[in-house]
């Protein structure tokens, strides 16, 4: 399955690491556009000095790992498509250009299902998408989550139960399922 990842999913660290970790595990093929990556870098710049540079380093690593993931929207698609927020048309156009199966976004109101359906695309939210991947390949997703939690603990110096970490990352259902797995 090919999934175009919106900037709002790439920007928060834990969410991005969970999503990209699932892609690294071979559970789906990620796609993005140069503009989406640029939006991520600009958003990181607002966090303070050095943050944009860190984001650009992570972007370079993603581009090296997935050289075919970056897709440019076609001008013809950009001209014919309509969404509630015209600034999101490039996301839909990139998904079409990349032959994606879905767009992963938190901005559900800006990507109406009927508009995406007309283009043969689904809309997925990270929490439910990752939860479905947990159901498909529990071992892989538990491994991804354990790695992400380990990094969060290493960087913060705090202990992070799965549920608390994933809730903070706007992945509450996934966190609940991982907590249940952790107890088992």
Image (cartoon, helix red, strand yellow):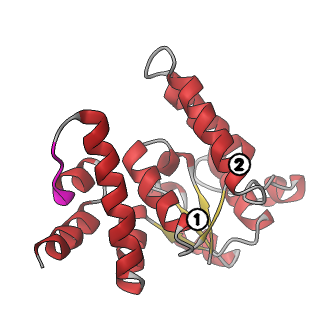
Q: Is residue 161 magenta?
A: yes
Q: Which residues are magenta?
A: 159-163
**Tag 1 secondary structure:** strand
Q: Position of residue 77 (x, y in %)?
A: 82, 59
Choose the circle earlier in sequence order: 1 or 2: 2
Give left or right: position of 147 versus 59: left
Task: Let me know if residue 128 appears in the view.
Answer: no
> Between tags 1 and 2, which lies in front?
2
Task: Let me know if residue 75 appears in the view.
Answer: yes
Give left or right: position of 90 versus 116: right
3D distance between C-alphas at marks 1 and 2: 19 Å
Q: Residue at x 81, y 52 (%)?
A: 72
Q: 10 Å neighbourhood of mark 2: few (<14), some, or many (≥20)?
A: some
Work out whether residue 151 or residue 120 is closer to the camera in this orientation and state it.
Answer: 151
User: Majority secondary structure of the magenta segment?
Assistant: loop
Vertical arrangement, residue 103 with respect to residue 54, above or below = below
Q: Position of residue 151 (x, y in %)?
A: 34, 46
Which quadrant: the N terminus? bottom right
Q: Residue at x 75, y 53 (%)?
A: 70
Q: Residue at x 35, y 74 (%)?
A: 131
Tally of numbered tags: 2
Q: Position of residue 154 (x, y in %)?
A: 29, 40
Quarter of image, res 137: bottom left
The disc label shown at residue 103, or none: 1
Q: Residue furthest top?
A: 49
Which quadrant: the C terminus? bottom left
Q: Is residue 2 magenta?
A: no
**Tag 2 secondary structure:** helix
Q: Residue furthest left?
A: 183
Q: Residue furthest right?
A: 76
Vertical arrangement, residue 154 with respect to residue 164, above or below = above
The disc label shown at residue 63, or none: 2
């Amino acid at each position: 399955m090919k999934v175009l990842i919106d900037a709002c999913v790439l920007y928060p660290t834990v969410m991005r690491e969970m999503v990209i970790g699932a892609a690294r595990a071979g559970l789906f093929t990620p796609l993005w556009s140069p503009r989406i990556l640029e939006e991520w870098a600009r958003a990181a710049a607002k966090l303070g000095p050095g943050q944009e540079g860190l984001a650009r380093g992570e972007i370079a690593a993603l581009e090296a790992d997935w050289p075919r993931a970056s897709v440019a929207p076609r001008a013809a698609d950009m001209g014919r498509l309509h969404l509630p927020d015209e600034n999101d048309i490039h996301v839909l156009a990139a998904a079409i250009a990349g032959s994606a199966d879905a767009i992963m976004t938190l901005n559900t109101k800006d990507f109406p299902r009927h508009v995406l359906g007309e283009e043969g695309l689904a809309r997925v939210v990270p929490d439910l998408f990752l939860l479905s991947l947990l159901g498909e390949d529990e071992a892989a997703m538990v491994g991804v989550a354990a790695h992400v939690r380990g990094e969060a603990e290493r960087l913060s110096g705090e202990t992070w139960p799965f549920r608390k970490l994933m809730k903070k990352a706007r992945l509450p259902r996934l966190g609940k399922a991982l907590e249940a797995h952790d107890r088992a």
